[in-house]
Amino acid sequence: MHPEASFPRLGALWQRLGDALFTSDAVQRIRLQQSALALALMLASVLVFFYAAQVVGTPSTSVWLWTGLSLGGMAAMLAAIRSGWSARFDDAALTLPQMVLAISSGAAAYALTGPLRGAVFPVLMVVLIFGMFQLRPRVVAGAGLYTLALFGAVMWWKSVDEPAIYLADVELGHFLMLAATLPAMSLLATRLARLRDRSRRQRVELAQALSRIQELATRDELTGLVNRRHMATLLEQERQRGVRSGRPFAVAMVDIDHFKAVNDQHGHAIGDEVLRNFARQAPLALRSSDIISRWGGDEFVLLMPEASLASARTGIERLRGRIAATPLAHVSGVPIRITVAAGMSEHIAGEAVTQTLERADRALFDAKAQGRNRTVIA
Ligand code: GH3
Ligand code: MG
């Protein structure tokens, strides 16, 4: 086999392995990866602890008990996340329980490692940093207080129990150092949470702006109908679908009769109202799959997908009847009625959409010439 051919397979295998370990759900994946990282940190700490216990001569039952509880607890958390059991909690990543376990395990290591106990502090800081990235500042502060209380108790107990190794003065120094560091941790957690909130807010605002821009780019401002540019895209998509499916589609060009007169007699504002109400009324006469767009001024282009010319014509006639019968504005209580003329064409396989539209436009011209308020088929 060519050596390069095996690389994609290796990639797929890697992906499958990742999915099997961490699932394919993105959020769950992050939780599990973080928990696996915590377990790895615990594993590394256990190795260091074994070394420390050797040097110091800690009784092996204590060492094995500590190891079993620490690693077993962390593995149980990982299993609880992987099985989906933890999903019932707000903190589905079990960050706080993992932290409490790690802090407690650290306190036990502190009590068991005598002169090497100082090695616990950097690990403790890493554990608290884990929480800073995940938890609310108040919870981080709570974890900090728990750390201080637990270590304070252990330091006091050991200074009484083994005063030769855990010198009272040294323990006080350690305690004061912890007490001085933890508020800084809380402060940093607050700043991180603020950063997280801000970036979340910006993401939401960006998504809203994007959907607003999409709206502006595809909708006509006055009537809310699909605009000309978007309709051109939809027509082209329909043509391409037709190439694959072999099904035809019809287009109609609809133009309000003597609309200039509405503007001239009643003013531009009433003209606008007529256009808006036309946009509201027209879809009610059409099938839900039909798309109506404002092509410009008082002219509208309709796309009738997968419709024969005969059934499309029925729709347009229904629209024409509805518009003629429905007042689209009132001036001093007097209803304003308008009529429309329509030109229709069916897309012919192989022709460009612009050609279909040109034929509909010519048919519209004929409908106007023949006296308006009618439909002509190209
Ligand atoms: P015809 O029956 O031949 O279509 O006659 P018409 O008076 O409707 O003529 P035409 O379609 O050429 O004129 C369209 C008019 O629509 C011209 C323009 O002033 C008016 N118009 C275009 N856009 C708007 C708009 O957004 N609001 C208002 N109120 N009027 C518009
Ligand atoms: Mg007109």
Image (tube, rainbow, N blue to C red):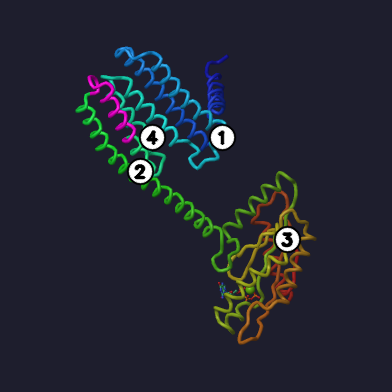
Q: CA distance from mark 3 to mark 1?
A: 48 Å
Residue 357 percent across, percent down from the top left: 66, 59
Secondary structure under the numbered disc 3 in the rendered image:
loop
Whether residue 121 is visible = no
Residue 20 percent across, percent down from the top left: 57, 26
Residue depicted at 48% across the width and 40% down the height: 91
Q: Is mark 1 within 8 Å of ligand 1?
A: no
- Specify the label residue 130 is tagged with: 4
Q: CA distance from mark 4 to mark 1?
A: 22 Å
Which sits earlier in the primary sequence, circle 1 or circle 2? 1
Residue depicted at 45% across the width and 23% down the height: 69
Q: Which residue is mark 1?
A: 85
Q: Which residue is mark 2?
A: 192
Which sits earlier in the primary sequence, circle 2 or circle 3? 2
Which quadrant of the figure shows ligand 2? bottom right
Residue 13 vs 172, above or below: the answer is: above
Q: CA distance from mark 4 to mark 2?
A: 12 Å
Give the number of the mark in front: 2 or 3. 2
Q: Quadrant of the C terminus?
A: bottom right
Please name the amino acid that badge 2 sits on.
Answer: Leu
Secondary structure under the numbered disc 1 in the rendered image:
helix
Q: CA distance from mark 4 to mark 3?
A: 57 Å
- Specify the label residue 287 is tagged with: 3
Please state the extent of the stretch shown in magenta in the rendering.
148-166
Residue depicted at 19% across the width and 28% down the height: 169
Other-residue count near label 1 (Cα within 10 Å), few / some / many at <14 / 14–19 / ≥20: few
Q: In the visual, does 336 lie left or right of 70?
A: right
From this viewpoint, which residue is outermost toward the left? 169
Q: CA distance from mark 1 to mark 2?
A: 28 Å
Q: Say how many tags the image has.
A: 4
Which sits earlier in the primary sequence, circle 4 or circle 1? 1
